[in-house]
């Protein structure tokens, strides 16, 4: 009969601990990748939010400039109409023709500024919507980063202590963090407690 050597129980326990540590370390590496994706998404959302806000502000400044020009055209038209009313019959036909031409040009100019303002206003509102979309995404990434960092710390504690329950909690926190990351990119559904 062949002799069977039984493994030392302490060696088995040590191998079991190493397997657990390796699994936790592997999961921690995956969580770190998701954390990097959350950080990237958060940085992108912040950058795009600020850029959209800047572009919207530029459009509103342009809108204001067009409003001022429209107002100036209307004031010049009114002054010209007053001048025409004062001088009326005293004007030569040539002078009257020039004033009528100037009045028509000022009317057209004011109308052009008004229509340009409407286009600018639409563009500014689109940019504000874009800004608001990125502003809504940002908190998801912030919470995701915090939860994923907590998960990594808990996984480290689980390795040091060899505690499976702590690792399960770490996995749960990581899953919630991954959910926040996913939703930050997709905005498929509103998560509770995020405004």
Image (cartoon, grey):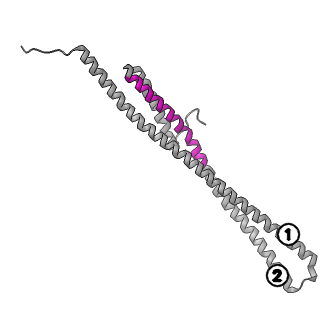
SS at badge 2: helix
- Residue 83 percent location from the top left of the image: 89, 74
Q: Which mark is residue 24?
A: none
Q: Which residue is depicted at the point 33% across and 25% down?
A: 21
Q: Is residue 59 above or below residue 168?
A: below
The disc at residue 98 is: 2
Residue extending farthest to the left is 1
Label 1 and label 2: CA atoms lie apart by 15 Å
- Depicted 170 relative to depicted 47: above or below: above
Range of the magenta residues?
130-159
> Where residue 101 appears, x then y in whole percent?
79, 79
Going 69% across and 64% down the picture, which residue do you hit?
Answer: 116
> Does the image show residue 62?
yes
Q: How far from the left and from the top, in percent, is residue 193? A: 59, 32
- Relative to 12, 48 lies left or right: right
Q: Which mark is residue 78?
A: 1
Q: Look at the image and tell me whether residue 163 can be seen.
A: no
Of residues 177 and 46, the one drawn nearer to the viewer in this rendering: 46
Residue sitting at x 64%, y 54%? 56
Image quadrant containing the C terminus? top right
Query: Mark 1 or 2 closer to N-term?
Result: 1
| Left or right: where 22 falls relative to 157 | left
Q: Residue furthest front?
A: 160
> In the visual, does 124 lie left or right of 69?
left
84 relative to 184 in the view: left or right: right
Residue 100 position (above or below residue 25): below
Residue 126 on the magenta segment: no
Mark 1 surroundings within 10 Å by alpha-carbon count, few (fewer than 14), some (14 through 19), many (20 or more): some
């Amino acid at each position: 009969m062949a002799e069977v050597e039984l493994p030392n129980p302490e060696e088995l326990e040590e191998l079991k601990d190493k397997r657990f540590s390796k699994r936790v370390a592997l999961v921690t590496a995956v969580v770190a990748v998701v954390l990097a994706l959350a950080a990237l998404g958060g940085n992108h959302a912040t950058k795009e939010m600020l850029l959209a806000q800047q572009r919207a502000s530029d459009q509103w400044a342009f809108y204001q400039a067009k409003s001022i020009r429209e107002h100036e055209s209307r004031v010049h038209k009114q002054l010209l109409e007053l001048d025409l009313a004062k001088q009326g019959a005293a004007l030569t036909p040539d002078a009257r023709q020039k004033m009528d031409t100037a009045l028509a040009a000022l009317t057209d100019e004011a109308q052009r500024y008004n229509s340009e303002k409407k286009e600018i206003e639409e563009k500014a509102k689109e940019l504000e919507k874009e800004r608001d979309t990125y502003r809504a995404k940002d908190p998801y990434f912030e919470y995701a980063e915090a939860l994923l960092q907590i998960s990594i710390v808990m996984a480290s504690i689980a390795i040091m202590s060899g505690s499976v329950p702590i690792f399960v909690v770490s996995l749960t926190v990581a899953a919630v963090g991954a959910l926040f990351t996913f939703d930050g990119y997709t905005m498929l559904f509103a998560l509770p407690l995020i405004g």
